[in-house]
Amino acid sequence: MDTEEKFLLIKRNTQEIITEEELRALLESKKHPAIYLGTSVTGRPHIGYFAWVQKLADCLKAGFKVKVLLADIHGALDNTPWDLLEKRYKYYEIVIPAMIEAMGGDLAQFEMIKGSDFQLKKEYILDVLKMSTITSVRDCTKAASDVVKMGDNPHLSGLIYPIMQSLDEEYLDVDIQMGAIDQRKILVFAREYMPQIRYRSRIELMIPFIRGLTADGKMSSSNKVSKIDLLDDEKTIRDKLKNAYCEEGNPENGVLDFALTVIMTQKMDKGEAFVISRPEKWGGPLTFRTKEELYNAYASKQLHPMDLKNGVAQEVNILLEPIRKKFDHPHAKKILEEAYGE
């Protein structure tokens, strides 16, 4: 894979890269760059996580060292009860590698790191304090505003969050940080302030959200009808998709988002088609080989919402089956129960 092929693979399905020129230079100069994504151990991961998991799988294919920070301390700063941090960390420790494998990622160059393993060390804490002396309350509030649950009476912990996320780039020894587009203010904050404490700025890569299943488009761990959980059974998945917001001819919905971003990307990489079963009386099966074909068919009302939902349900169930199987064992079930009371 040459530099241009790597660049296009990393760029696809992203919303913004700060900056593309730096990414090209990195790919030219370094055979195995390092990228990380941090995820707070808060709510239960859902299928929306596949957007960034798939991008990390792309990075693995391009020869990157891929690191996922399971951010237990960040989870506490974002109001996860302290006594649940370790239990939720253990749940994430099982499902995140399983998701990487489901996307075809090679775990040989994949590493998971627990935040508290390095974020409580003297050197890190000193850097947090150092950065706190040069950043303002206003800038930290602005950086955290789209990520941390601030509320009407925000806690001080929310202001520490962007400082720590910035420093993680240095302590994880990476070239790129990746996040969803709601992380943009924190990623820009890192670019601005890291050089001020004599650390280099990193490339910041952002991916768009996959919309949720409700009309407001939000996929939230706290709203069960807005998302498909990684452990939902086949019937639950079909029922959730059956009731999902999916207006005919209007491509602005989470069902089509998932089909385009995850299903079609996977199919096209494998040289396969996305086949939606349909009774002969309604025209028989539909076959899509490109994202454009699928998008245009839906936008022009050639593809009915219920047919799309049925096709997506089938693919989601295939994707989640190996993850569900990991929780057939009593030990894994106990981890789930302790972490989320289920």
Image (tube, grey):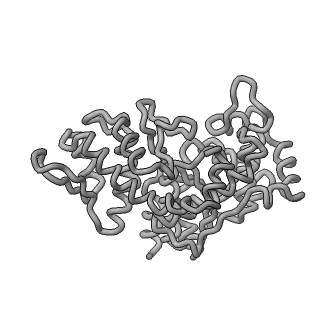
Q: Does residue 200 appear anywhere in the picture?
A: no
50 vs 157: above or below: below
143 vs 203: above or below: above
314 vs 3: above or below: above
* Residue 115: percent from left, percent from top: 74, 56
Quadrant occupied by the C terminus: top right
* Residue 305: percent from left, percent from top: 27, 40
The answer to whether 107 appears left or right of 211 in the picture is right
Q: Does residue 122 appear anywhere in the picture?
A: yes
Quadrant occupied by the N terminus: bottom left
* Residue 136: percent from left, percent from top: 79, 36
Residue ranking furthest to the front: 330
* Residue 169: percent from left, percent from top: 70, 58
Q: Nearer the viewer, residue 38 or 304?
A: 304
Q: Residue at (61%, 60%) from the top-left corner?
A: 330
Q: Residue at (24%, 46%) from the top-left corner?
A: 296
Q: Nearer the viewer, residue 192 or 49?
A: 49
The answer to whether 104 appears left or right of 136 in the picture is left
Q: Nearer the viewer, residue 57 or 317?
A: 317
